[in-house]
Every structure is written in structure tokens, then in C-alpha cells.
Amino acid sequence: MDDSQIPLMSLKSVSRCFHSKVSKIEILNETSFNIFKGETIAIVGSSGIGKSTLLNLIGTLDKPDSGQIFFQKDDLSLYNDEKLARFRNSKIGFVFQFHYLLQGFTAMENLMMPGLIASKNKKSVEKSAINMLERVGLLLRVSHRVEDLSGGEQQRVALARALVMEPDILLADEPTGNLDQKNSKSVHALIDELNKELGMTVIVVTHNNEFAQMMKRNVTIKDGKIIPV
């Protein structure tokens, strides 16, 4: 098997459920799923089927009740919390519906945070931050505090922050859910361009059919299984 056939990430017989006071809600039931380098995937379907739960499992923000999640050949269930945090910081970029930027800090400072947490050289981190802000069209907003930016600009800063460490996988949960149509299309196009330019794997949760159709593969969750659409 050559490298192109080896999954970048794999879910093996993964189960995840939640318990309410009166019932057990099964999200995933011994389902398996492979993710390959450079591909684009949209997780689609109605609200409440577990799309965000699946994204959080892939991003190691949540852990399965049973089964294993592999990154290449590494079993992530064997990682302790500190090692998982380092893995997320270096390998996974996150973009959410709400940007979760640090208020009172500039766009530049927000972008530098992941690199500084990883103890990278400050000048190198600054250079990467400037390059990525230029890439998302915000070079003139480097010194602007995030609260002084428009909603579309804030989401582009959030996208740039997710990409500044050059992660292997970009995970986006309704990344344009709070944006108008013009800004939504701009972010969609930018994600598509960055996938093609950087060869980065992109996985998005979206209700936007146009955005979903830009992805090479669409999947949903039915009866606890991840299935193609």
C-alpha cells in the first residue's frame, strides 16, 4: 500500500452516546471512517444527528465511549491530555460558527497565540501570522483589535488563526453560519483555494448546500453509522 492509500485519520468501530434523565441517545454505533490527506468532506444532514459530535471526535475535543481513533498509525487513545493538546495545536485547525477570538487583542496577536503556546520562535511566529493575514486579505488589519473588525473580517481572522500552524486537517463547524451571503461565499472560496494550494484536508459541518457541493465527499449520520450521501 502506497502513502496515498494510507488514511491520514481513521475511526475504527467508534461508538458515542449521551445519557439524559430518561433515555440513552446513541450518536455513533461501532462505525468506521477513513479520512485521506488533501480530501474535502462535508458532514451534512438535519440538526441533532451528531454532526458536531463527529467533528469533535475527529478533532480530539471529545473521546469515544469505545473504539479507536488513529492519526496515521498512532492510536490517539493512548495519548494523555497534554500530548493530545500538543497534537491538536500542531495538527488540527479549528473554525467555528462563532469566531472565539480574544477580545482586546489585535488580529496579529490572535494569530500569534497558537505559535507562542507551542513555544516557537517569536520572529518566526510573527512572519507566519503576517503571511496568513495577507493570504486572507487582512494585511491592513494587522494592528486592529478584533472588536473593531466587521463580522466577515473577524471570521477571516479566525480562519487565518486556524491555518497559521499549517495543520494537516482543517475542521470547520458552520464557519459561515453568522455571515451574510457575500462574506459566506468569500470564506467558502478561500477554504477551497487553501485546500488546493496547501493540500490540506478539510472537513466541514454545514447546512449550506452550495458549500457542501464544493466538497469532494458528502457524508451524514444515520442509525449510528457514517454513510455517504
Image (cartoon, rainbow, N blue to C red):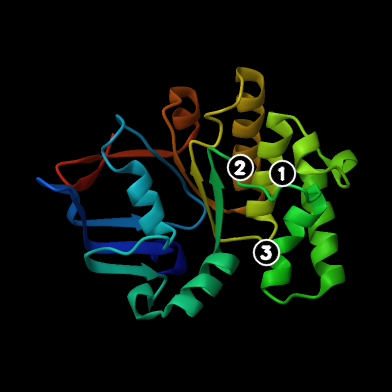
Pointer 2 residue: 99
- Identify the mark nearer the N-term, 3 or 2: 2
Q: Is residue 111 left or right of residue 214?
A: right
Secondary structure found at label 2: loop
Point out the image quarter for the N terminus: bottom left
Q: From this view, report whether residue 223 is shown above or below residue 208.
A: below
CB within 8 Å, label 1 to label 2 = yes
- Identify the mark nearer the N-term, 3 or 1: 3
Pointer 1 residue: 157
Q: Amino acid at mark 3?
A: Pro
Point out the image quarter for the C terminus: top left
The CA span between labels 3 and 2 is: 15 Å
User: Mark 1 against mark 2, which lies toward the viewer?
Assistant: 2
The CA span between labels 1 and 2 is: 8 Å
CB within 8 Å, label 3 to label 2 = no
Q: From this view, report whether residue 218 is shown above or below residue 34.
A: above
**Which is nearer the eye, 199 or 25?**
25
Category of crowding for the residue at label 2, using alpha-carbon neighbours closer than 10 angstroms: few (below 14), some (14–19), many (at least 20): some
Q: Amino acid at mark 1?
A: Val
Pointer 3 residue: 114
Q: Is residue 178 left or right of residue 68?
A: right
